[in-house]
Amino acid sequence: MSYLIAIDLGGTKTITALIKNKKIIKKIKFQTIKGKSNVIKQLISSIYFVLISINKRKIEKIIIGVASPVDEEKGLIINAPNIKGLKNTNIKKILENKFDIPVIVLNDAKLQALGEYSINQNINSLFFITLGTGVGAAFVYKGKVFSTEFGHSIIQLNGNKCSCKNKGCLQAYVSGRAITSLYYKKYGKKLLPSKIFQLAKKSNKNAKKFVDETGFYLGIGLTNIINIFNPQLIIVNGGLSKPGNIILKEAKKVIRQNRIINWKGKIIISQLQEDALFYGAIYIQGSSAVGP
Ligand SMILES: [Zn+2]
């Protein structure tokens, strides 16, 4: 019997799951709190929670996906701009010392992309993007995954300031945080992205214009991706992906107008949603799918 613990450590929420024989059997979701020691305490208690009534020696691995670039060999979180206090944290060492179970740390988008690939294995090239607190992305080619910093590709010269301190990054236009703060700056109302999308769907003029602009920037970013990688499939996931279907409409228009190659691929919303990362953890259990 093989058990696995997989953790999705995100900027807003964290989910810890227990997986038995490749099936998710238990999940706990909580808000990610600020500060290194708080985050670690939270992770440890969530692991204890999913371990209730299971002998920890039955757990083969703990796989963590973090919204950050990661030194996979060391298990080090290099810099997580959306999770305060975790810069240069060796999460692998901390959890291995605590639980004596092997820990694997990966970028979250990389794991999610592999999860999406695991249910699309007939596809040779897949570009995955997640729109959440920030923007994550990874590219899967013939079953091997590569991380990207697509969220920090510059789509507007001298544009909005990003959490990475550069200007004009895609993330400074299409992430959850950016959407709320840009809308507030423009129209003086502090609204969650889902509320803004809802208003746009109801044809509220300001919201509609704003959402079209957001879709425009996403479209510019994805046009670049299409011109570089020509992926067969683009999958959009993340908290904003479902209500944000409305953004994709505009993005697709921009892609049609601007791409250079005769692109035959398609863009879809993830079916796996928040489980993509756990499917990725199941997929890499005993595989060598992870590239640089
Ligand atoms: Zn940036």
Image: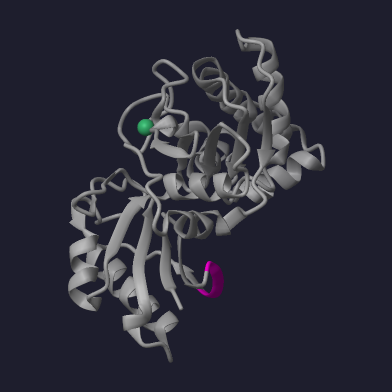
Residue 207 in sight here: no
Q: Nearer the viewer, residue 261 or 290?
A: 290
**Count of numbered circles in the view:** 0
- Check the image and report above or below for 131 versus 259: below
Residue 211 in sight here: yes
Q: Residue furthest right?
A: 202
Residue 9, picture quadrant: bottom left
Q: Nearer the viewer, residue 244 or 27?
A: 27
Q: Nearer the viewer, residue 137 or 74?
A: 74
- Check the image and report above or below for 218 versus 31: above
Q: Nearer the viewer, residue 60 or 183?
A: 60
Q: Residue furthest bottom?
A: 53
Identify the main secondary structure in magenta.
strand
Q: Quadrant of ligand 1?
A: top left
Q: Quadrant of the C terminus?
A: top left
Residue 129 lies within the magenta run: no
- Numbered range of the magenta stretch: 22-27
Where is residue 108 drawn, in percent x and y? 42, 50
Where is residue 217 drawn, in percent x and y? 57, 25
Residue 202, picture quadrant: top right
Q: Residue at x 56, y 59 (%)?
A: 275
Q: Residue at x 41, y 45 (%)?
A: 289
- Check the image and report above or below for 37 versus 244: below
Where is residue 224 drawn, in percent x and y? 52, 18
Asked if residue 91 lies left or right of residue 147, the reply is left
Q: Residue at x 60, y 8 (%)?
A: 260
Q: Residue at x 73, y 30 (%)?
A: 249
